[in-house]
Structure formats: C-alpha cells, structure tokens
Image (tube, coloured by chain):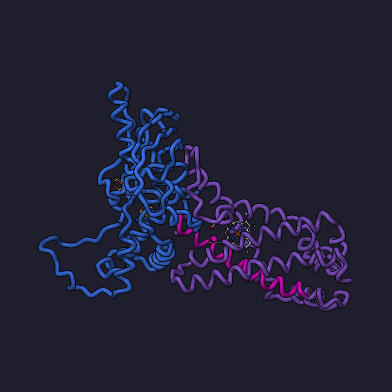
Chain colours: A purple, B blue
Amino acid sequence: MLTSPVGKKWVMALTGLFLITFLMVHVGLNACIWADDGGIMFNAAAHFMGSMVVIRIIEIGLILGFVIHIIQGLVLEFQNRRKRGVAYKMSLGSRGSKWYSRSMGLLGTILLLFLILHWVHFWIPNRSHQGWLLGEELNLYQEMKVTFQQEWVVIVYVIGCISLAWHLLHGFQSAFRTIGVSNKRYLALLNAIGTGFSIIIPLAFAMMPVSFYLGWIK
Amino acid sequence: MEHNNINLILKVWKQKNAESRGSFETFEVNDISTEMSFLEMFDVLNERLIAEGKEPIAFDHDCREGICGMCSMYINGRPHGPWHGTTTCQLHMRAFKDGDTIVVEPWRAKAFPVIKDLIVDRTAFDRIIQAGGYISVNTGVTIDGNAIPVEKENADKAFAAAACIGCGACVAACKNSSALLFVSAKVAHLALLPQGAPERKERALNMVAQMDKEGFGACTNTGACEAVCPKEISIENIARLNKEYALAGFSSDK
Ligand code: HEM
Ligand code: SF4
Ligand code: FES
C-alpha cells in the first residue's frame, strides 16, 4: 500500500510534516543565540537536548524521517520524469501550477547539499564529541561563531534557507492535501499559515549565520 | 460579432503508426473563418489534402460538442489550446490571429501511446474504470430518482466530479504524467453517493493500482491538471481520494 502512487504521497507528507515539527524545535532552540550572552543560554539548551534520553530517541526517528523523505523524494522525482516518453515541442501545459510546486526535486536537492555541509559543520562533530567517542563536549556557540566568519559558508547557508522557503511554500499546504484535507476553507487557512511559516522560519534560520558574520552578536 | 477570415501556418505532428518515429510537418491553411471550430479548420485542411491526393491528418473526435472527451490535441503548448475550460472541438478560430503559427501535438505520456498522427490510445483510462469505476446493480426498470435520499451538498459535489469526460488533458499537462485527477474524480463521485458505498474500499485501492500498472506517474499536488481540465474538475477530489485510499487500505478485508 505504501509503495503505490498514493502511498508514496502519504510517505512524503508524513515525513515532511515530521520534519516541519523538527524545524520548529530547531529554530526555537537556536534563537537562544540572540540572547547575546556569549552563548551561555544557547549552550545550556544544546546540552540539554544532547543529553536527554527522550530527545536522543526521537533523534533516531528524525534521522529515519530525513533518510526516508530524501530517498523517496528523489526516487519519485526520477520515476515521474520517465513517464512522459517523447517530450513536447511546446510545453506551457503546466502554467496553471506554481514553478516551485514543479521544482520540489530541485529545491530538495539544493537543500540536501546544504544539509550535508550543515551536518559536517555541526551535527557530526557535536555528536562524536558527546560522551564516549571523542570525549569533551564542544562549545557549539563558539563553533558557530568561528564557522560563520567565512563568507562562502554564510552564502551557502542563506541559499539553503531560500530553497527551504520555496520547498515549504508548496510542501506545507501540499502535505495537508495529501493527508486528505479537502475542505476549501481549511485549505485556505492552511495555505495562509503555510505561507507565514515558509517565510518566517527560513528567514529566522538565515539570520543566524548573518548575525554572526555581521557581528550583531558577539 | 466580427467576421473575418485568417491565414495560418500549422506545425502538426505526423506519425505513420505506433512503431514509427514521427516528426513535425508544416501546412499553410488560408481563408479560415474565425467562426470555425479548431476541428473544422482541420476538416478544411484534410479536404484539401485528400483532393491533392495526399494523406489527411488523423485526429480523434466524436461528439464535437464538448462532452465525449475524444478531441485530444496539445495546441501551442497547452491541452485543448489557449482557452480555459474548453475542449478542442469547442475552441474556435477567433482564438487566433491572422498569420499565427500553431503547433499541434498529440498527448505525450507513455501510458497514452500514439497510434497515428494526433491520435493516442487512451484505453488505459477504460481499464482504470474497469478496475472499479462502476457500481454493481441489478438491471431492470429505472429506479425512482428520489428513492435514495442524497444530501444536497454531496449531490452537488458528486455531480461536479461526475462531469469528468475522461479526455486525458490532466495527464497531458501534468509534469508527472499522473492520472490522479481523473481517478479522483471517479472515486470521489461514487464515494459521495450512497450507491457507491458497497464497493467503496475496493474501488479506491483497485483504481489506484491500475493507474500505477498503466504507467501513469504519481501526483505531487502541483495543480496543473485542475487549470487545464475542460470540465474544471477540482483537485479537492485528489485530497478526497487520498483519504479514501488510506481508510480503505487500513480497513480493507483483503
Ligand atoms: C528540513 C527539510 C525538509 C522539510 C521540512 C521538507 C518538507 C516537505 C514537505 C512538507 C513536502 C510535501 C509533501 C506532500 O506534498 O505531501 C515535501 C515534498 C518533497 N520533498 Fe521535502 N522537505 C525537506 C527536505 C527535503 C530534502 C533534503 C529533499 C531531497 C531531495 C526533499 C525532497 C522532496 C521532494 C522531491 C518532494 C516532492 C514530493 C511530493 O510532493 O510528493 N525534501 N517536503
Ligand atoms: S479530470 Fe478533467 S482533464 Fe482529466 S480526464 Fe477528466 S475531464 Fe479530462
Ligand atoms: S469531440 Fe467530443 S469533446 Fe471534443
């Protein structure tokens, strides 16, 4: 059932919605950097998340969510592309749809490239320094401060956030359609919430490296 | 209304049969009344080709009144041409200007192989209907229309979904070549009515499975289908199908 065309939609929507809830937690925690207290509050929050068993168990779910969403997304993109056969000479038939709704594979791939860099920067070093592997917990705030002095890194992060914004602009409301919301009024409401979410959350994320780079926070 | 005649250049897909490769051929058509339909313009061209001893252009058509869904043509990059909510037979030549070049292609989808020129094989849709797009009843005298009460709201929505004519424009426009708007229109139509209840679960599961088997793509909610559908079927029906499918999948006895 999950491998049928409709089942695949459900998998994308459920993992997508799960990733959205993760984004809310992640942006909330990271916002602690703007306390501008030399990272005391942020590091405390990061330590709490890193050391709590419940969170670590949920994290396994998160990794699975990412892996399934990414693999299924890319598989879907390539399977769907093969269904046309001969290409149209003139193709305006999809003009009734938004460009970003047709570019979820591309936006997702840009997002993935950014995520790989992001994991190499923070997640992997952080986890491997916690506990048994390399000992000695990292001062994440300090890590951020150093990492975000590099111009190209800040640019890549901002590009990642822009792709995330477009990805969510389609993905947020689409996921609710996928799980069966057909009521016009609720869809309009979800569309409005989704648009707000897709602008505010990526903007907040993008402001983090920018804030460090421009020295707004010390 | 303004009467005038226009001259046009047509670039039409010509393909001998399903096996051959096909290519575009250019035709000049002159003195076309703007009150003709797009198909009548093709009739004029074909009459001439026949008179010249050449092979006419093969295209599908039947009712010529916008209800059979046969007249599949991808005109200037859009299914059924530039007008909204229109089939090719209802597209009139006043949509074009004197001297325009018009590119005409068949539907492009692996599940709709070209048979000849502009004609594609749409029997994949028939097989999807056979997989569950029906209700089983004993035939006999016509049942009184009001014998089974139907809520007005549901009756309206079912009626709107039932307007689908199976033309395939949704597939033609979709970047994924997905037939989900068509399938969802059929599933929603019957799911909204009490008559559809007995076979409800199997219908959703089997029609989606058949769609997959026929080689149509998976929906990603882009909405291109809804925008080109001549019967303006709403993608609301796709959401309805998604719910039907999940409920059926979890509770089906098979
Ligand atoms: C934090 C990261 C991400 C979030 C929050 C997210 C969220 C979503 C959501 C909500 C959808 C809509 C699902 C639906 O239409 O039912 C979606 C679709 C999609 N995502 Fe992501 N996504 C993320 C990362 C990625 C990545 C890294 C890829 C990598 C390739 C990707 C590829 C796709 C594709 C191809 C689709 C379209 C499939 C469809 O609509 O059915 N996503 N995403
Ligand atoms: S849903 Fe619309 S576009 Fe698709 S087959 Fe039915 S009438 Fe044609
Ligand atoms: S010929 Fe029947 S809909 Fe156009």
| The residue positioned farthest toward the left in the image shown | B141
Q: Position of residue A160 (x, y in %)?
A: 71, 58
Image point (15%, 62%), residue name: B138
Q: Is residue B135 magenta?
A: no
Residue drawn at x 81%, y 56% is A153
Q: Quadrant of the C terminus of chain A?
A: bottom right
**Quadrant into which the N terminus of chain A falls:** bottom left
The residue depicted at 37 percent of the width and 31 percent of the height is B30
Q: Residue B85: name its quadrant.
A: bottom left
Q: Quadrant of residue B204?
A: bottom left
In the image, residue B130 sits, relative to residue B158, either above or below, namely above
Residue B103 appears anywhere in the view: no
The magenta stretch spans residue A5: yes
Q: Position of residue B210 (x, y in %)?
A: 37, 51
Q: Quick check: A172 left or right of B42?
A: right
| Numbered circles on residues, count | 0
Q: Which residues are magenta?
A: A3-31
Give whichever of A75, B105 is nearer the camera.
B105
B19 w.r.t. B71: above or below: above
Residue B164 against residue B201 in the figure, above or below: above
Q: Is the magenta region chiefly helix, strand or loop? A: helix
User: Quick one: B123 or A213, which is closer to the camera?
Assistant: A213
Report x, y in % for residue A157: 76, 59
Q: Position of residue A95 (x, y in %)?
A: 51, 51
Q: Position of A64 compared to A2: left or right? A: right
Camera sees residue A95:
yes
